[in-house]
Image (cartoon, rainbow, N blue to C red):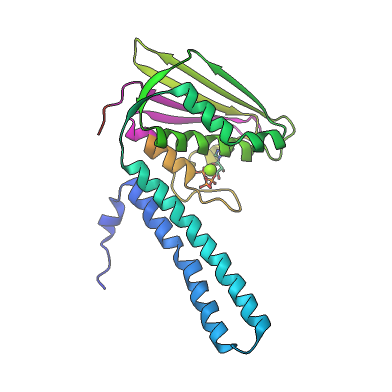
Amino acid sequence: MKPIPLKDVDTLDPISEIVTMLAHQINSPLSCIIASAELSTCHADDETAIKKHCANILKCADMIRDLNRKILKIGKCCHFRTEMVDLTTLLDNCLDTFKDMYEAGHITVKRTYDFRPMPIRCNPFGLEQVFNNLILNALDAMNTVTDRRLFITATCDPAAGTASVWIRDTGTGISDSVLSRIFLPDFTTKKNGNGLGLAICKYIVEKHQGNIEAVSSEGNGASFGVHLPMKVLSS
Ligand SMILES: Nc1ncnc2c1ncn2[C@@H]1O[C@H](COP(=O)(O)OP(=O)(O)OP(=O)(O)O)[C@@H](O)[C@H]1O
Ligand SMILES: [Mg+2]
């Protein structure tokens, strides 16, 4: 097979890069499934061994199903259709998704909305992904601290036609060396992280002709700002 020239790989757009990486990640559990299936045929008369290999096959199949779900979600974001939605309702829905988690973790949530409703034209599925990823990261960052507060602020400037959402947590914060890499696909500091959440957020926000920024220092929590035009053009 002809190798892909390096130039073509370098020019992959961020979403193709992420999908390629996810597809690549399917190879490991797939190899395990093949190995376990082969081993079961070798030990066809050993019930204990068969059970062990079947359990491994199921575990790996689950991993593939998870990766596939992620690829399908990203695919949905690529069909970039926009509609008018109320940004504050969208944010409330995202927060509700994690209600059990922040209640169980004794996390206080404070929301401040400039206006209600706050109508903006956007791809609602895409923006939900953005805010869900940011909220989940904030909850993760507060696992190891005692002061656990999450602040969601939405402001808008109708004259300028812009809306901003800030998600701030009182978690571990981010050191300078980590901060410079957090939006890169495949960058994670978590044991079970994929390092894709923020790369996907950046892709979706930029599709909306907006931008995303992170402000943090180690030990002082983190704030993520999402700045959006209120009337993004359909593309
Ligand atoms: N609120 C936060 N506080 C502290 N660190 C953060 C925060 N948000 C992101 N990070 C850092 O940025 C890294 C990248 O985040 P990102 O969401 O892209 O990936 P992840 O959370 O590690 O994995 P996943 O793909 O499952 O989201 C994290 O591993 C973490 O080190
Ligand atoms: Mg994440």
Instruction: Identify the residue shown where x is 57% and y is 48%.
Output: 189
The answer to whether one can see residue 65 in this image is yes
The answer to whether one can see residue 181 in this image is no
Left or right placement of residue 149 versus residue 184 in this view: right
Image quarter in which the C terminus is found: top left
Instruction: Identify the residue shown where x is 53% and y is 20%.
Output: 153
Q: 194 and 80: which one is in front?
A: 80
Identify the magenta region.
205-232
Image quarter in which the N terminus is found: bottom left
Left or right placement of residue 190 versus residue 126 in this view: right
Query: Where is residue 29 drawn, in percent x and y?
Result: 50, 67
Q: 44 and 13: which one is in front?
A: 44
Above or below for 125 versus 153? below
Query: Where is residue 224 drawn, in percent x and y?
Result: 51, 30
Above or below for 9 versus 78? below
Query: Where is residue 90 drawn, in percent x and y?
Result: 47, 27
Left or right placement of residue 108 versus residue 225 in this view: right
Name the image quarter holding residue 176.
top right
Q: Residue furthest top?
A: 159
Q: 96 and 182: which one is in front?
A: 96
Query: Where is residue 12 drawn, in percent x and y?
Result: 30, 51
Above or below for 63 versus 201? below
Total tally of numbered discs in the picture: 0
Residue 210 shown in magenta: yes
Above or below for 176 versus 54? above
Residue 22 shown in magenta: no
